[in-house]
Image: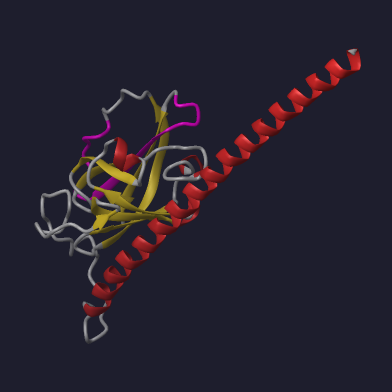
Amino acid sequence: MFESKYSKVLTVILVVVIVAILGLLGFLGYDWYQKYFLENDALAFVENYTDEADNKKENTVPEDNTAATNPIDSIERTNTVSGSSGNEMPKYKGFNVVGTIEIPAIDLHYPILEKVNKSTLETSVAFLYGAGINQVGNSVIAGHNYRNGLFFSNNKKLNIGDTIYITDNSKNRLTYKIYDKFETTPEDASFYSRDTGGVPEVTLTTCNDDSSKRLIIFARAE
């Protein structure tokens, strides 16, 4: 009698353990599936987008092979977020795109969506505040830290001197160098508006791994 009850208890425990393991595997599988397809979709979009920028660059090389002007000097000043002179913005998963961001040091490549909200931040990174992509002044780009490599999860691995490439809707592609990295409170926005000395800058913002602070990265166009 005792052995029969003991056997039933063990069976129940075993079933619970199996269900828990299957649930965990399902969760991890879904997380991997979501990460894999989001990253591949983003990479395909960015590659197509930057190919157009490369074609523009090739078509504007002087015929006498003289050195090209500084790309910052040739940026079309639009005073708009899109940097596209009012043309219709490209779309990514139904959202307006204002540019793309690539960071080789952490294998990051995403479209920059036009506005920060719950839906855009679950899809890619997004423009939060500032002068506009590749425009003179500071532009703040926000992204989630999901602790799984998506979006800005790996920003903590970036170092001063690392390179960021930003391409805008006019297909201007600028190179930025990271010059500062720090943590601050979630409420701190004092650095959003700052004097950039007449050159484009970007600020990347995300939460740290325990969400207690914001990880901030400054980069300046070269």
Q: Residue at x 25, y 81 (%)?
A: 66
> In which quadrant of the rendered view does residue 68 lie?
bottom left
Q: Position of residue 81 (x, y in %)?
A: 17, 48
Q: Residue at x 42, y 26 (%)?
A: 213
Relative to residue 190, is residue 23 drawn left or right?
A: right
Residue pushed farthest front? 1
Q: Position of residue 77 (x, y in %)?
A: 12, 56
Quadrant housing the N terminus: top right
Magenta residues span: 191-211
**Residue 142 visible in the shown view:** no
Q: Nearer the viewer, residue 15 or 205?
A: 15
Q: Residue at x 46, y 45 (%)?
A: 150
Q: Is residue 180 magenta?
A: no
* Most frequent secondary structure within the magenta stretch: loop
Q: Residue at x 44, y 37 (%)?
A: 145
Q: Nearer the viewer, residue 24 or 136?
A: 24
Relative to residue 191, is residue 3 drawn left or right?
A: right
Q: How many marks?
A: 0
For residue 6, above or below residue 89: above
Q: Position of residue 65 (x, y in %)?
A: 27, 84
For residue 3, above or below residue 108: above
For residue 20, above or below residue 2: below
Q: Nearer the viewer, residue 191 or 111?
A: 111
**Residue 195 visible in the shown view:** yes
Q: Position of residue 11 (x, y in %)?
A: 78, 26
